[in-house]
Amino acid sequence: MTDPSPQPTAQFSFAVRSARRPTLYVLAERSLTALIYACGISAIFFVVGIFLFVFKEAAPVLFSDRFSLSQFLFSEQWYPTSELNKRYGVLAMTAGTFSVTALAMMIAVPFGLGAAIFISEFCGPRLRETLKITIELLAAIPSVVWGFIGLTVMSKLIVQLTGAPVGVNILNGGIILALMSVPIIVSIGEDALKAVPDSFREAGLALGATRWQLVWRVLLPAAKNGLLAAVLLGVGRAVGETMAVLMATGHAVQIPHGILDSVRTLTANIAAELGEAPAGSDHYRVLFLIGILLFTITFVVNLAADMAVRGIRKK
Amino acid sequence: MFAETPFVRSKRRSEAFAKWLFFAMSAAMVLPLLLIVGYLFVKAAPSLNINFLLDVPRRGMTQGGIWPAFVGTVYLVFISLAISAPVGILAAVYLNEYARDNWLNRMINLAVINLAGVPSIVHALFGLGAFVYAARLGYSILSASLTLAIMTLPVIIASTREALASVPMSFREACWNVGATRWQTIRAVVLPNSISGILTGVILQVSRAAGETAPIMFTGAVFFKAVQKGEVFAYHLNEQCMALSMHLYTISTQVPGVKESIPFATAVVLLASVLLVNAAAITLRALMRSRKKW
């Protein structure tokens, strides 16, 4: 009888050879990985690209002697098409943006946080699902439809109820923006409340606190960073909103004195005038400069929101 | 023995009060949605029929239908989707499967957050500067779609990431332990187990892109374009097109003498398409969630 034992070396080398993957396959995987890395980094390129391209269009006027930055920021005179006395001051539009955003937040923050508290603390699972889906749908309504609602439904209501001469004004835009930014406040606020550990709630209830006290004394302080982030993201959305305010706030370039005054916001100004400004003209470049201003405002707001969220994660 | 003491009663009352207060606040947001949608439908009713959808605008857009705008929106949405979905999904794969917790990853996260926060009109300025002029694509469907794609990218990245993160780590570890590479694991384990979540995100992107107006207004959408009634292949990539959202803006602010129900009907068509697409995404998500085994 010959030796029955197998030849270990031969088998081993066979196993190694089959485990080696074809070169082509390895190359394909490498290039795919490179593609994934490239896509991952693309977000940075896009943000930087947005800034650079908008800045590139704005730069010639920013550095020319026909233009002064302090006049741009602090003058309320906006006469871009005047023959003799051109003025590019955006203070009135900045005031417009801030007044509409402030009103929107005065409405949206209490209601949004209240709804977030209700969804996360008070309601049963079925109602919670229903409310969350409704809020998701609310968030999906296109801004031009909101603007249309402001222009047709809300403006009539405002004229009837307040006797204002025009229905497209700060009040109209503020209510529309509040409805638009509430969904983001609710969803981020609910996440923040959900992140508070249950042991906090149990400890509060064990001490005999009512749920009202629990909300005020325990949950709101514990979740304050996340709630702040929710509010800031709502502000960011309201500042950047274009079509709705373009249609709902009227078109008067003026510093508002009351809630029933018409205003024009920074975003609406770009949308309204970009089509008429000849490409390459000073007027056109100043509109891009307003874009840079808006980009800067929302960048700072979003950065602050991100830092607030990071604050809770560290704890 | 169990009679309420005044203290207990006041406690119960404050509890009930809190509950009703917060309920009222939630209801105050849900009710407007129902009222507004109902009101729009009532006002739109005289014009709402299949012919309104299939007909072209007539008599200087004061009469007729919305077909060219509807087709234009479909074009814009699907071309932007074809660009943003692959990039967004791969970016999310990178962030969730490859990236380590270092400064680069933090920079990317910050960029995604900020990309989501850039105002839509600034996206429009970017599209105008980068695609229309610098890349010499002109005012075209392609420029508008690229602008929309970049705008909706963060939505896709965020939702895909969430879907990928919901696949348990042990699935990946099991796959690595039988000798699979990182990409093999992603293809064989991670993507099949998260595909429903990814699809949901992509569908939600469709609804967001369909409603946007500002980014396409200055890059490729146009007030009016002559198109045959019911024609599907109405536009070329290098042409301008009409879009539903832009059309609604135009006929409700710029064109005098439009029949009253037409802007309402346009708003209803836009709103209904967006909400239907959203409802589809939500249903899909609910369906997949109930099938999940872990």
Image (cartoon, coloured by chain):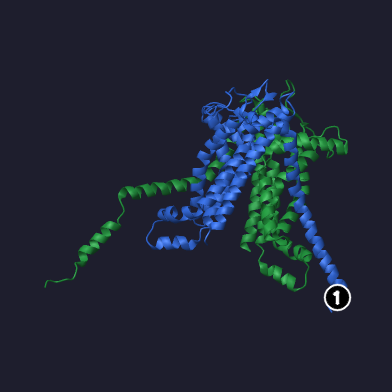
Quarter occupied by the N terminus of chain B: bottom right
Please report the residue visible at 50 percent of the width from the left and 61 percent of the height from the top: B168
Q: Amino acid at mark 1?
A: Ala
**Residue B88 vs residue B124, the one in the foreground:** B88
Please tell me whether mark 1 sits on a helix, a strand or a loop.
Answer: loop
Please report the residue visible at 88 percent of the width from the left and 72 percent of the height from the top: B6
Image quarter of residue A177: top right
Find residue B251 and report its horizontal and vertical position in percent: 70, 28
Task: Report the chain shown in blue.
Answer: B
In this view, B223 is above or below A289? above
Task: Report the chain shown in green.
Answer: A
| Relative to A22, B10 lies left or right | right
Q: Which residue is mark 1?
A: B3
Question: Neighbour class for label 1 at 10 Å: few (<14), some, many (≥20)?
Answer: few
Please report the residue visible at 71 percent of the width from the left and 68 percent of the height from the top: A201
**Residue B6 vs residue A239, the one in the foreground:** B6
| Relative to B38, B8 lies left or right | right
| Relative to B239, A98 lies left or right | right
